[in-house]
Amino acid sequence: MAQSKGWVRRYFKAFCKGFFVAVPVAVTFLDRVACVARVEGASMQPSLNPGGSQSSDVVLLNHWKVRNFEVQRGDIVSLVSPKNPEQKIIKRVIALEGDIVNNGRKRERI
């Protein structure tokens, strides 16, 4: 009986050590490096959700590039909706700072 209690105690102790190491590492990774998000809707078709409204795609959002201001034309970015702060939206970057945009298309700066 004493051996079985010792085994349970060792197992519980090892589990707690792993848990208290893994949770902060996972939270830091998801906050600072990358996270997984689900994309619904048709606004990014055919790149995302080619099947239409019946399906949703799962994407990996790279926080590192945004923190280092490495966003380029053609990148897909996720941001908080200006109309509804509780909603995240996904858009494609068509222009960068200093570019002139005309009717939704980038035009070279003269």
Image (cartoon, rainbow, N blue to C red):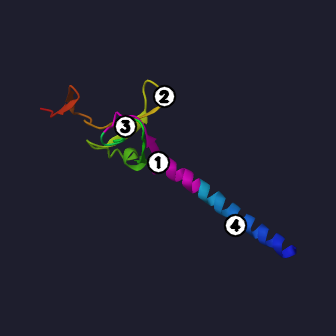
Q: Residue furthest right?
A: 1
For residue 85, which numbered disc appears in the image?
A: 2
Magenta highlight range:
24-45
In three-dimensional space, the C-alpha distance between marks 3 and 4, rounded to whole angstroms, equals 46 Å
Mark sitting on residue 36: 1
Mark 1 surroundings: few (<14), some (14-19) or many (≥20) residues within 10 A: few
Residue at figure coordinates x 25%, y 36% from the top left: 94
Q: Residue at x 42, y 41 (%)?
A: 55
The stretch drawn in magenta includes residue 23: no
Q: Is 3 rendered above or below residue 100?
A: below
Sequence-wise first label, 1 or 4? 4
Name the residue located 29 percent from the left edge and 38 percent from the top edge: 93
**Disc ID at residue 14:** 4
The residue identified by callout 3 is 52
Residue 100: give x, y in percent of width and height.
20, 30
Camera-nearest residue between 36 and 29? 36
Of the image marks 4 and 2, the number of the one nearer the N terminus: 4
Of residues 63 and 67, the one nearer the viewer is: 63
Number of callouts in the render?
A: 4
